């Protein structure tokens, strides 16, 4: 099986290291800059609480056109970079492959198969993904895995290891089963969901709340949890997301208590020990001066709320602040 990791940053690097170490597929990596150079020279090093592994992918490149067609392409690019990659993704997936979008927030294919099927301008501005790649070639993937690039070619895994994948139409297809089997054989806790939309909303309870407030305050999750006023704001965002999800036909009310508890435990899931210093991806990007995934994590949530006429005053307050922060980061990088 030919597998490509398109965007081997923190999440993609973790996945590439796991699959490569298990030798369950021929793994290729698309990366750029110093990170790509380090991987090509030294391999990907994954540091975990259990120890370190180093993996040398079959091919490391910043030129996707060098790759043949793939069976599976894990797209771990930031959402704002996905649309430009549509032509390359179409070629890489060919006639039989598929692209698994493992990214934060609402995905570009969200309305595929619905009565109002159309591209989402906030996420796919010119419709390139919708029209060139086509949502029928996409699988969704919700990632519960805390990772951070700590040096070029080096990824640190901080905890959690759950990857929920699904077809937009809810079917348990052969390609979905193949992706799950690959992950499980590689030591990654992959699972198939018959309702990926609800899974995405459940992740957004944590994602939109922790990413937004941590990026704006520059606090890790446990720092956020120490402030009663910030906790109250986070709880309000959680309640608003539950309301929007319900209007979209997804009931995640039962997730409220777990989302609040995870926040208060520094981002740790379930019965895991409390975590210190966990920095959500948006905080990592803000501290590094990189653009933020504002629209997928918060902007599209507001857009869906407005479609359904659901009032979201907390999200309406946070979103322009995040957009302003993102604009300043982009301007500094020019």
Image: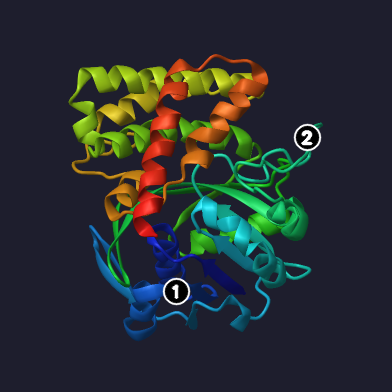
Residue at the location (58% across, 54% down)? 101
Say which quadrant the C terminus sits in.
Answer: bottom left
**The quarter of the displayed image where residue 64 is located:** bottom right
The residue beneath circle 2 is 114
Residue at the location (63% across, 15% down)? 309
- Residue closest to the eye, 178 or 80: 80
**The quarter of the displayed image where residue 10 is located:** bottom left
On residue 20, the disc is 1
Query: Callout 1: 10 Å neighbours few (<14), some, many (20+)?
Result: many
Considering the numbered disc 1 on the image, is that residue within a helix, a strand or a loop?
Answer: helix
Considering only vertical position in the picture, is 264 above or below 15?
A: above
From the viewer's perspective, is 204 left or right of 72? left
In 3D space, how far apart are the residues under numbered discs 2 and 1 (Cα atoms)?
37 Å
Considering only vertical position in the picture, is 241 above or below 93?
A: above
Using the rendered image of the protein, determine whether residue 268 is visible from the camera's viewpoint. Answer: no
Say which quadrant the N terminus sits in.
Answer: bottom right
On residue 144, the disc is none
Query: Callout 2: 10 Å neighbours few (<14), some, many (20+)?
Result: few
Residue 58 position in % (x across, y down):
49, 83
Number of numbered callouts drawn: 2
């Amino acid at each position: 099986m030919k597998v490509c990791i398109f965007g081997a940053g923190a999440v993609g690097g973790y996945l590439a290291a796991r699959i490569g170490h298990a030798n369950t597929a021929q793994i290729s990596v698309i990366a750029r800059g110093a990170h790509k150079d380090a991987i090509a020279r030294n391999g990907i090093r994954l540091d975990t609480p259990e120890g370190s592994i180093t993996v040398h992918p079959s091919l490391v490149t910043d030129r996707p056109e060098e790759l043949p067609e793939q069976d599976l392409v894990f797209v771990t690019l930031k959402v704002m970079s996905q649309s430009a990659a549509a032509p390359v993704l179409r070629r890489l997936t060919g006639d039989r492959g598929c692209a698994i979008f493992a990214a934060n927030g609402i995905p570009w294919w969200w309305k595929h198969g619905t009565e109002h099927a159309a591209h989402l301008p906030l996420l796919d501005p010119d419709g390139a993904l919708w029209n060139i790649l086509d949502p029928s070639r996409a699988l969704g993937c919700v990632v519960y895995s805390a990772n951070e690039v700590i040096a070029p070619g080096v990824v640190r895994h901080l905890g959690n290891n759950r990857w929920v994948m699904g077809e937009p139409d809810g079917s348990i297809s052969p390609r979905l089963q193949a992706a799950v089997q690959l992950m499980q054989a590689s030591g990654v806790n992959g699972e198939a969901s018959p309702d990926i939309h609800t899974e995405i909303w459940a992740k957004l309870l944590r994602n939109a709340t922790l990413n937004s407030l941590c990026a704006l305050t520059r606090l890790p999750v446990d720092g956020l949890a120490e402030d009663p006023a910030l906790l109250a704001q986070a709880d309000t965002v959680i309640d608003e997301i539950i309301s929007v999800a319900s209007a979209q036909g997804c009931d995640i009310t039962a997730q409220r208590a777990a989302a609040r508890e995870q926040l208060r435990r520094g981002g740790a899931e379930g019965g895991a020990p409390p975590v210190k210093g966990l920095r959500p991806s948006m905080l990592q990007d803000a501290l590094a001066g990189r653009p933020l995934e504002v629209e997928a994590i918060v902007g599209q949530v507001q857009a869906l709320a407005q479609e359904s006429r659901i009032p979201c005053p907390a999200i309406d307050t946070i979103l322009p602040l995040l957009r302003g922060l993102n604009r300043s980061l982009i301007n500094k990088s020019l």
